[in-house]
Structure formats: structure tokens, C-alpha cells
Image (tube, rainbow, N blue to C red):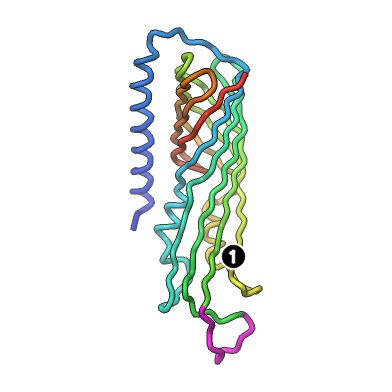
Amino acid sequence: MISKQAAFCQTASTGLGLLLFLFMTSAKAQSDKRPEPEQHDIIITVGAASSFVGLQQISNSTSSGYYNPNGTMNAFSYPAGVVNVDWSWKERLSIGGCFSWQEIGYRFNNYNYTPSGSSIQSNPVLINWVDTYDRYNLAVRLLYQFVQTKDFQMYFGVRGGYTWWSRRSTNPDPFYNFDPYNEYSHIFITPVSIQSVMGMRYFFNETIGINAEVGIGAPYALLLGVTGKFK
């Protein structure tokens, strides 16, 4: 079982190592180029991100509140999908809007299940179902580009947003109770999220590039994405 501390250290070190490698290789190639301010550019990034919520959900799958010796319960977690839109309104400053969505949940196979309203003497039925929990985050952020050339940028900043959850299930019982919902919808004390980020962008041409970010705070820890730059 992966502890939260070990997962944090492993993901953070991987992200920081990736950023350091990309910075050293790209900055060397760009060192002879004059920095070129790029005001009023719109930079759109679409990517996938790792999340500590997903790691926690998998590591705590045996403590979800369900128990059935005759069935199996498998936890699943997908990377968060992220869309960031940043507008360079000053030489090295940009403001932006962000959206992320992540899906986590449980698959129940061959479970003995007694529908709501049935008597204790009733024989349970054998069914399969899936509980899914969707986490959404909408935010704004401010970035400062401390390294900026024609093709390469490094930046840090702060991101403030709002997180909300939804849930769904394929269980046929209309009175079915989502036991783990409170656990995952209240992982954070407040739905307001604050995140500090550090990242880099490398552009292959005037329009297309790649993006990597390390984040401390919700909603993700490491982001990898494809970036487009538009005038």
C-alpha cells in the first residue's frame, strides 16, 4: 500500500527532475537567443495530470466501507484532464482561466446484494455495478515568466479555484447509498483550492509546443500537456 507521504515525495521528485532536465537541455540550446517579450499572446494547454486524490483513493480502497467475502471490489482512478488558457498581458506576466476534471470510483463484481426494502430473510441477489465520483475544478491563475526566449519559457505562479463533486452509479437499487461519497467529497476542508505551480513550455514552432508543470495543492501534482500559442 502506498502511503500519502511516499506518494507525495515520489511524484514531486519525478516532476522536479523532469523540469530540471528539460530546463538544462532547452536553456542551453536557447542561451544565444535574445529574450523576446510576447505580449497579448493567448496560450492554450490541454493535458493530463496526476492527482493525490487518485493515489489516496487507490491506496484506501480496502477501507471504503464495503465488505463482501463472495465478491470483488476494484478501485480505479484516471488522470485528471486539464485545460489552461493564459493571456500574456505584460512582458513577463500572464493571467489565465483553468478547468480540470477527474474520474475515480469502484467496480463491484459478483456481489451478494440485498435491495432496499427487502426482508432480512430474503436471499440477496448476485449483481455487478460501478460507483463513479467526478471531481471538477474551475480556477484563475497568475503566472510570472522568469525565463523567456523565443522558444522556451519557465514560470511560477499561483492558482485559486473552486472544487465540486458529482456521483453516479449503475446499481439498480433506487435507494442505494453511496457509502464512500462523504469520504471523497470532503477530502478538502473547503471547496476553495489554492495551488502554487512551477512549469516550462517549449515551442517547436510559432504555434505548437509542450508543457510540464509541478503543482503544490489542488487539483493536481504533475501536468504534462500540448500547448498552442495564438496571436
Residue 75 against residue 138 in the figure, above or below:
below
Callout 1, which amino acid? Answer: Ser
Mark 1 falls on what kind of element?
strand
Q: Residue at x 43, y 54 (%)?
A: 56
Q: From the top left corner, tell me how far across and down residue 180 is, in percent.
A: 52, 64
Q: Which residue in the structure is indicated by mark 1? A: 169
Q: Residue at x 53, y 79 (%)?
A: 113
Residue that lies at the very extreme toward the right in this rendered image:
174
Residue that lies at the very extreme toward the bottom in this rendered image:
121
Tell me: 70 left or right of 133: left
Q: From the top left corner, tell me how far across and down residue 199 is, in percent.
A: 45, 29
* Quarter occupied by the N terminus: bottom left
Tell me: 231 left or right of 14: right
Q: From the top left corner, tell me how far across and down residue 120 is, in percent.
A: 56, 89
* Quarter occupied by the C terminus: top right
Q: Residue at x 57, y 46 (%)?
A: 101
Q: Magenta segment, which residues?
A: 116-126
Residue 109 against residue 94 in the figure, above or below:
below
Residue 9 against residue 200 in the figure, above or below:
below
Badge 1: residue crowd in 10 Å (few <14, some 14–19, many ≥20)? some
Residue 138 against residue 85 in the figure, above or below:
below
Nearer the observer, 105 or 138: 105
Nearer the observer, 55 or 42: 42
User: Residue 90 appears in which quarter of the rendering?
Assistant: top right
Nearer the observer, 145 or 30: 30
Asked whether residue 189 is drawn in magenta, I would say no
Q: Magenta: predominant secondary structure element?
A: loop
Asked whether residue 125 is drawn in magenta, I would say yes
Number of marks in the rendered image: 1
Q: From the top left corner, tell me how far across and down residue 107 is, in percent.
A: 49, 65
